[in-house]
Image (spheres, rainbow, N blue to C red):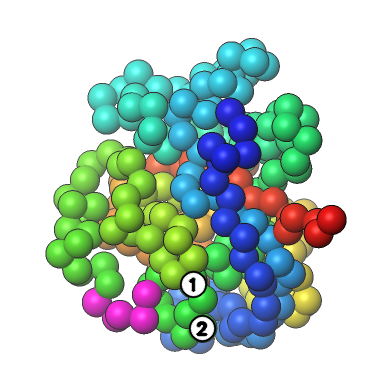
Amino acid sequence: MDATELDLAALVGGRFVMGSDCERRDEAPAHAVSVGAFRAARRPVTNAQYARFVAATGAAPPPFREFDGFVAPELPVVGVSWHDAVAFCEWWSGEHGVRVRLPTEAEREYAARGGIAAARWPSADASWPEAELRRFVAELDAPHVPDAACANGFGLLCMADNVHEWCSDWYDRSWYERSPSASPVGPEQGRRRASRGGSWRHRVKFTRVSARSSLIPSYRYNDYGFRVYADAEEES
């Protein structure tokens, strides 16, 4: 695996309104935040990429790797705990000399919005989840290989569907009431780690770009995976 396989897209960062005053309580209050430039992988980490980490380090293989619907090499890896995801990032960084990591919630929401300031989905189209182009996703009962039908304005795939993706932050449902505005990170401690994105396992497969979720970091669920991020490249 090399940097081209991770396919990192460069995002310029900027100021945007994070959260929503019209949805769930943990998304409020909507508040202006700024994030610096960073890079985001165009798709979640795959089974094939994670298998190389397992082979190189002796880490435990994901528990769902042999189940029907979960085995294809290009599917998002699932059944990965937050600790597993962090270990993968540390291993890959050491192998290739480019530090990759999990995103903050602010980076993840900025990336999911795809350059659209005020939208519930990765598109300005309010009917985005119902479009015929994405009908196949709504009918699935397992993860799917990322498809261009789910791309947002930044060219990132499956930011509102497929698998939940771990974030680096601790989760606090009331954090937005006191979150800093510049490059915010979550609270210093907590019980659950934040996650974002939709889930093949839910009745409604697509999730709004401001929607928050969380899980105990040691848990391994069959709809939890991750995507790698990195700081912006330094100019030479």
Choose between 207 and 102: the one closer to the eye: 102
Horizontal side, residue 156 vs residue 231: left or right: left
Of the 4 image quadrants, the one containing the C terminus is bottom right
Horizontal side, residue 87 vs residue 20: left or right: right
What residue range appears in magenta? 123-127
Mark 1 nearby-residue class (10 Å; few <14, some 14–19, many ≥20):
many
Q: Which residue is mark 2?
A: 117
Q: Which residue is mark 1?
A: 113
| Residue type beneath disc 2 | Ala
Residue drawn where x is 51% and y is 58% of the image:
196
| Residue type beneath disc 1 | Arg
Q: What's the CA distance linking mark 1 and mark 2?
A: 7 Å
Q: Is residue 59 above or below residue 205?
A: above
Q: Is residue 194 above or below residue 227?
A: below
Residue drawn where x is 62% and y is 65% of the image:
11
Instruction: Name the residue at the front extreme.
Output: 236
Do callouts 1 and 2 mark residues in contact (Cβ within 8 Å)? yes
Label 1: state its secondary structure.
Answer: helix
Label 2: state its secondary structure.
Answer: loop
Residue drawn where x is 55% and y is 78% of the image:
19
Q: Is residue 105 above or below residue 47?
A: below
Residue 68 x %, y %:
26, 24
- Magenta-drawn stretch contains 6: no
The answer, for residue 183, to whether it is visible in the render is: yes
Residue 227 x %, y %:
55, 46
